[in-house]
Image (cartoon, rainbow, N blue to C red):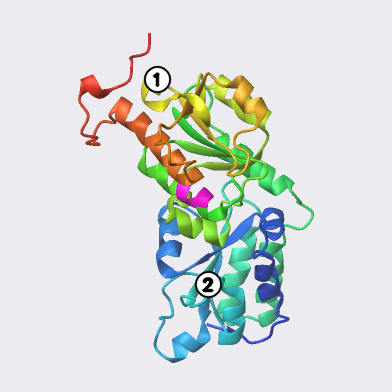
Amino acid sequence: MRTVTSKDNPVLKSARKLMTRKGREEAGAFLVEGRKLITEAFAAGFFSERVFVNAGALARGEAEAGVFERETALEETLFRGLAQTVSPQPYIAVMRRPGTEEGPADGAAGAAHLAESGTSESADEAAGATNLAGSGAGESADEAAGATNLAGSGADGPGRVLVLDRVGDPGNAGTMVRTALAAGMDEVWCVKGTADIFSDKAMRASAGAVFHLPVAEGLSARDCIERARSIGARIIVCSAGGEDLYKAELLGRIAVVVGSEASGAQNELVDAADAVVGIPMTEKAESLNAAAAAAVVMYEALRQRSVPGVDCGVGSEGRGPSPE
């Protein structure tokens, strides 16, 4: 395994670009830190172009070589500069975004293998430049990823969708994705203005759930409305002024919309809603955190439909009204 020791190394410089949303969107790739999250991404079928290993941790016996394919050791100071946590774990992977696996990564990965076999450093650097550049693709790479994520939905597509409408806090967004997976949702759609689900903070908040649910980003409110109509899903908007959640019907195909923490769901989605629901609260409580509100609504939907194999502790008398 070769060791990168220069901050000007093209492979490292390309990886650094993935620390910003713009860089991730242009390259169609993102960083995953920590052995557990990387392993989970692999288990979910994600493709890794490269895994950086902390050279200092290797020297101290705190990390192992050969845990992952396409490993490159990175000098400790440089590694810490790439990490996005205070006490980083010794592995950082460059992962392809969904829908971009067949891009330049395949040929570049082959070059990386040759380089790590000792062919030449220049081959490795060329691979890194090809791998992460995504140059010229611009936002089209991200749009293509979104289109691929939604492909196959159609009339027989997802029965339950979580729509994040400009949820700006990555911790909240990631937590909602985590809850969506646990509550049996099928997809997550993100309206433009929502935090990047593939940012480090959002991925950590999702506890790896982002790897197991199709996520489409950069959608407009109109995109979400049309998509919901195309799969026959009722649009359920969460709002403090809505009807009592526990009197609402959440059976069948639904798209649950959770709006911005500051301003709620935008008017276009509210106007298109089949139902606007609110969570009953005591008089002393002003509101719920967006992630908490989303969890309550998604679990009420789960309670009503009593997913086979999931013990919700609810008998038929506790379900919402049956669809006509």
Is 52 placed left or right of 320 in the picture? Answer: right
Q: Element under label 2?
A: loop
Asked if the magenta segment contains residue 175, the reply would be: yes
How far apart, in angstroms, are the residues tagged by discs 1 and 2?
42 Å
Q: Relative to 268, is 177 above or below? A: below
Quadrant in the rendering for residue 266:
top right
Disc number lying in front (1 or 2):
1
Q: Relative to 318, is 162 above or below? A: below
For the view shown, which residue lies furthest in the bottom direction?
A: 60
Q: Residue at x 59, y 65 (%)?
A: 109
Q: Residue at x 44, y 27 (%)?
A: 159
Position of the C terminus by quadrant: top left
Residues in magenta, as a range: 172-176
Q: Which residue is mark 2?
A: 85
Q: Which residue is mark 1?
A: 249
Q: Amino acid at mark 1?
A: Glu
Is 28 placed left or right of 153 in the picture? Answer: right
Q: Measuring from the top left, give residue 88's x and y in whole percent.
A: 49, 76
Q: Relative to 263, is 120 above or below? A: below
Earlier sequence position, callout 1 versus callout 2:
2
Is 243 placed left or right of 18 in the picture? Answer: left
Q: Residues within 10 Å of mark 2 (few under 14, many from 20)?
A: few
Q: Residues within 10 Å of mark 1 (few under 14, many from 20)?
A: some
For the view shown, which residue lies furthest in the front direction?
A: 284
149 vs 282, nearest the viewer: 282
Regarding residue 127, the answer to whether it shows in the image is: no
For the view shown, which residue lies furthest in the top direction?
A: 324
Asked if the magenta segment contains residue 102, the reply would be: no
Q: Measuring from the top left, give residue 322's x and y in whole percent.
A: 33, 14
Q: Element under label 1?
A: loop
